[in-house]
Image (spheres, rainbow, N blue to C red):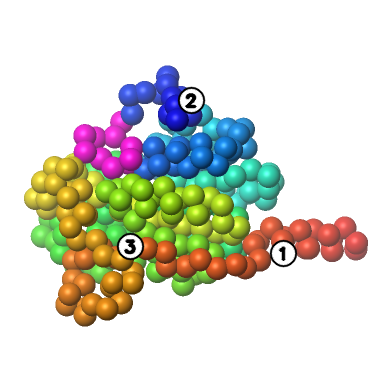
Amino acid sequence: MDYLYYLRQSKMPHIWCDGCGHGIVLKSLLRVIDKLGWDKNDVAVVSGIGCSSRTPGYVDFNTLHTTHGRALAFATGLKIAKPQLHVIVVTGDGDAVAIGGNHFIHAARRNIDISVIIYNNYIYGMTGGQVSPTTPTMKKATTTPFGNPDAPFDISRLAAAAGAAYVARTTVYHYARMDLYIEQALTKKGFSVVEVLSPCPTSYGKLNKLGNGVDMLMYQKENTVSLEKAAQLTPEELENKIVVGVFVDKEQADYQEHYQKVVQKSHNV
């Protein structure tokens, strides 16, 4: 495929650091859209603020770069107004489940037909390396120099509990699995979430002495286990392991179906 066909070349070079996995996620998204044969005019990519949220600026689709944590609010309005569009939200861990946490939960609860790709880099990468809702316990950030005392959010299980129709997790090392999960999410009717672990090598990696981007990719390779294998392991054996797979894949009525019924009833009053 021709990646350049889908990129705004005038916006290059991108701002992502050496070793950052965000570019891997971007290429995966473009491969899937190319495979599906979607017209660029039928795709809308929405983001908030953060390293991941630079993605819409680089892609030649209908795009919205919105305010911090509000990508899903904008995307909800867009999907209701233009239901024929394939609406994709690109967001980070801080953007999605910190300031945008309630939007995330309620978008999943409504089961609105939006696909969300979460670049989970374990930290606020763009604004200074502060601790985020997914920073692992006792790992360092610029705001927790002696270690993070909080337990991190499990984004995928949060999305599943909130009612999403499709939820999957993978890492930037496992690019083939990423392609598969993003394709399944984009073609799923209802609210779909793909959490991609893309730890920040610049802030998170350096502060925690995890090596460079390649070292962090190798860690993902060596410490990832499937949901099926994880079910057979003890809590002690699962410590520091990355559990990947499809957490939810179910059929249920999406928000637009209910919304159109309400609209029709209002016309009959």
Q: Quadrant of the C terminus?
A: bottom right
Taking depth in this image into account, of 22 and 217 the one nearest to the observer is 217
Element assignment for label 2: helix
| Extreme residue toward the right, this view | 268
Magenta segment: 15-24
Q: Amino acid at mark 1?
A: His
Q: Is residue 212 visible?
A: yes
Q: Nearer the viewer, mark 2 or mark 1?
A: 2
Predominant SS along the magenta part: loop
The residues bearing labels 3 and 1 have C-alpha atoms spaced at a distance of 32 Å
Q: Quadrant of the N terminus?
A: top left
Element assignment for label 3: strand
Which residue is the site of mark 2? 5
Which residue is the site of mark 3? 244
Q: Is residue 16 magenta?
A: yes
Residue 258 marker? 1
At which x and y percent is residue 37? 57, 37
Above or below residue 6? Residue 127 is: below
Which badge, 2 or 1, comes first in the chain's sequence?
A: 2
In the rendered structure, the answer to whether residue 44 lies left or right of residue 32 reads right
**Residue at 72% from the left image edge and 64% from the top image edge:** 258
| Extreme residue toward the top, this view | 10
Q: Is residue 258 magenta?
A: no
In the rendered structure, the answer to whether residue 165 lies left or right of residue 52 reads right
